[in-house]
Amino acid sequence: MSGLFQVPWSDYRSDLFDALGRTVSYTVVSFVGAVLLGLAVALLRLNRAWPARIIAAVYTEVFKNVPLLAIIFLTYFGLASAGIRLDVFTAGCLSLIVFYAAYLSEIFRSAISGVHAGQTEAGEALGLGRVGIFAHVVLPQAVRQALPGTNTMLVDLLKSTSLLVTVSAAELMSEGRLITSATFRALEVYLVISAVYFALCYPLSQLLLLLERKVRAGVPLSPWRRRRVRAARALLAADLDAGANRKEAAV
Amino acid sequence: MTEPVTTAKTVPSARTEAVVRIEGLSKSFDGRTVLDNVNLEVDRGRIVSVIGQSGGGKTTLMRCVNLLERPDGGTVEVAGEVVHSGGRTLCRDLPRLRRTVGMVFQKFHLFPHLTAVENIVLAQRKAGVAEQEALERAVALLRRVGVAHRGLAQPEQLSGGEQQRVAIARALALRPEVLLFDEPTSSLDPEATREVLSVMRELAADGMTMLLVTHELPFAREVSDHVVFVDGGRIVEEGRPQDVLDHPAQIRTREFLAAYGSTS
């Protein structure tokens, strides 16, 4: 055991923190991008016009059936050889976005089409426009449906940023490789790097589970919903008091 | 595109006495005729019940009023405005039409991600009602239907009867000129049915204009001014409830009522 930890970790602390920050940046930017693109593809896939549906379906199938590593090589090396030179951060994020958008679009599509048709009808009957129905009736219910799958994808994406080691993206895994080549302590270094990934992913997935539970229980999370529910609670309490007084007066 | 024959609620007098006027309505799905030359009027403050077998076209007829279903032919007039005629939608502002016409569904269709109170506030806000006023109206309506103590519950925490009463409050919140009820008690147990019918009875007493599709014949007899028996997409018989329900002139009506009597 005494032989295991011999790397001078304090020398690498600031480099490791930089790398950690970069892993987080890749994750955040790629996830936001993948959610937006995935939603767009899902909406295309649910579009009435069949060309839109075909384009979306082809996109989804292509990127679901090509390895992420191949996509990374294509965007970084492939495009460069065709004259489109992307910096490593752009190429990395782009790869992760197009890959995860394919999976997310499937999750979003089934969540959106899983919202009962009666919900749309109720929205129509209440005079909500198309946009209002989507934003206030369909989307919130779809989010509830899509949350578990989406959360899995987020954690998966975070772990997949490690593949960017192949294009020297200077994130955690690249840093690990660097330290290994300087110290020749592969077991120790990759154990530590793995532990850092675990320390990121485990709390994240637990947090997301908590979020899922709250959303499923209908807890108002947005500030404006909270404000509305609080105002309603005050009004309802006043109303019930008034009701009790009316009853007492009647007795 | 032709202009509507009459514009909005500007025409007063006897013509606008009918909040809903349907003439020569026809509708088919995939070549199967569901409605065939149907005429129907609901005057202000009146309650019209549509009865008949399932699949006979009752619900489709009702859904044509707020154009959830677009008729193939005939005319639909709501609050003095011709909204649909000859297979074409003349109403340019469907959301406005639908705020004029409240609707209560058989399966409630409350928004499951919102509390009862928020269910009632949502459409009001979209219609331009201020937040505080919308909330106050929602609470007043919840009290009116007897569910104020459950105002912050999610729909799934409510009993069927409570859900339907919240749905009625939601439909009332936009102050519609007419309320459509599509078999509002068909998904409910007898206790919940009683709760919902008692709310509807109060609405009737307050002078609400209502078009009601129902299997609750005793209730239809009690509250309706006019009963319409629909079968095979046509109006077979209509008139005062005591006439249609107690002394039907048509054989088909008698058969329906006899079958109904034997099953209940």
Image (tube, grey):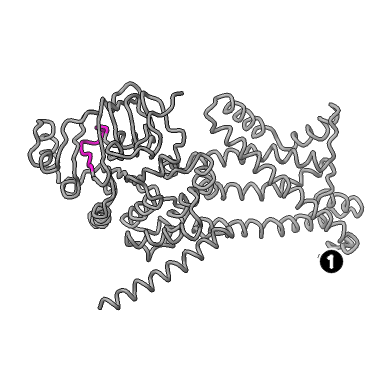
As helix, strand or loop, the secondary structure at mark 1 comes to loop
In this view of the protein, can residue A76 be seen by the observer?
yes
- Name the residue furthest top: B31
Magenta-colored stretch includes residue A79:
no
Which residue is more in the foreground, B261 or A212?
Answer: B261
Q: Which residue is mark 1?
A: A2
Q: Amino acid at mark 1?
A: Ser
Q: Position of residue B108 (x, y in %)?
A: 36, 48
Q: How many marks?
A: 1
- The stretch drawn in magenta includes residue B53: yes
Q: Quick one: quadrant of the N terminus of chain A?
A: bottom right
Residue B106 percent across, percent down from the top left:
32, 45
Which chain is home to disc 1?
Answer: A
Q: Report the span colored magenta.
A: B48-57
Decide: few, some or many residues near mark 1? Use Cα within 10 Å; few <14, some 14-19, many ≥20. Answer: few
Residue B141 horizontal/vertical position (percent): 37, 58
